[in-house]
Image: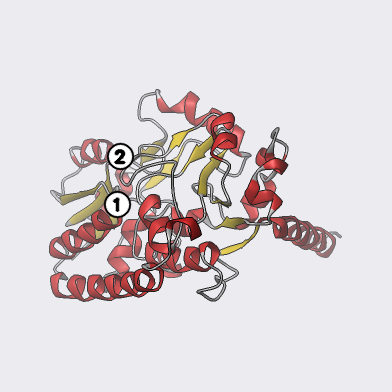
Amino acid sequence: MRIVTTLPSATETVAALGREPVGVSHECDYPPAAASAPAVTRSRIDASGSSGEIDQQVLETADTEGGVYDVDVETLAELEPDVIVTQGMCDVCAVDVAVIEDAVDRIDADPEIVPTDPHSVGDVLGDLERIGRAIGREERAREVRRDLESRIEAIRIRTADIAAEDRPRVAVFDWTDPVMVAGHWTAELVDWAGGEYGLADVGEASSPREWDDIRDYDPELAVVAPCGFGLEQTARNRTDLTERDGWADLTAVREGRVWAMDGDHYLNRPGPRLVDTLEALAPIVQPNRFDGPAADIAVPFGELENLETARDKSESRTEVDSSP
């Protein structure tokens, strides 16, 4: 079966079910072998810039014909897909199902299009089984779902008895300029990890917030996980928050409970590794009940400067080594 995926979470899901896509999106990078497959999409924005620059590019591009992403129709035709797994949740995060449908109308193949639109962990698990049925891996999908649910339950059991007064007020930012509050599955992840999330309900989309609203909420714990940013790119954009009026006065900042998380691979990628996100959140939210998160997933916010310094030194050495 020839499968094409048009977003990273779909690629991860298909891989978890034991299939290798013949084509992927330009952003697919996990598992690592996925990066070598032909890309059928490309972005019209430069995602290496600052959060403010990226936001401006998105605003300028979103209303143009085709939106933020292009589909390489020629490559798609050459791949002759039987199934295309795409999404309808966010036309900024990945190519939208309507764009894929238009591209399919222009090729000879007649693939089944499987759109995903997850807004909760339950939706993500449901998509896992839907994709499994579409690609002939239904039993494997049930096995993977059972394993993921078992890992979720293991966390929930350890936090079920935590009283309301012992659950910290949590803020999770999935963009920093403008400030956006993480939605969708974030509220339930925080709840299961032993925290209180008063910024969005389960299923509610991520949304921009006035900074004064954040100050009024006064989180006791903050997690910074910009969509599409790894830890190094978050480090380069950390002043989006640290230079805001009142940042230093937030309880989370005063008490040293601000963390940076890889938002690209974990919090904002609705695939199997969303459970890894929960397992990383739990020790951040309830450090007395869990061992610390893996350093490649989350680090204390104050350590971001060290990451940026290490990157700058590495780039300096590369420039010296390559000089005549």
Does residue 23 appear in the picture of this structure?
no
State the residue at coordinates (44%, 69%). Answer: 279
Spatial separation of the CA atoms under disc 2 and disc 1: 19 Å
Closer-to-camera residue (73/182): 182
Q: Is residue 141 left or right of residue 250?
A: left
Image coordinates for residue 36, horizontal then vertical, percent:
43, 64
Quadrant assignment, res 107: top left
Disc 1: which residue: 120
Image coordinates for residue 184, horizontal then vertical, percent:
35, 46
Quadrant containing the C terminus in the rendered view: bottom right
Image coordinates for residue 235, horizontal then vertical, percent:
67, 51
Quadrant containing the N terminus in the rendered view: bottom left
State the residue at coordinates (60%, 56%). Answer: 260
Amino acid on which the number 1 mark rests in the picture: Ser
Amino acid on which the number 2 mark rests in the picture: Asp
Sequence-wise, which precedes: disc 2 or disc 1? 2
Disc 2: which residue: 96
Residue 43's place in the image compared with 82, above or below, is above
> Callout 2: helix, strand or loop?
loop
* Neighbourhood count class around disc 1 (C-alpha, 10 Å): few under 14, some 14–19, many 20 upward: many
* Neighbourhood count class around disc 2 (C-alpha, 10 Å): few under 14, some 14–19, many 20 upward: many
Residue 49's place in the image compared with 141, above or below, is above
Does residue 290 appear in the picture of this structure?
yes
Quadrant assignment, res 313: bottom right
> Callout 1: helix, strand or loop?
loop
State the residue at coordinates (45%, 55%). Answer: 267
Image coordinates for residue 203, horizontal then vertical, percent:
30, 44
Q: Is residue 130 left or right of residue 267?
A: left
Q: Point out which mark residue 108 bears.
A: none
- Contact, CB < 8 Å: mark 2 with mark 1? no
Closer-to-camera residue (215/111): 215
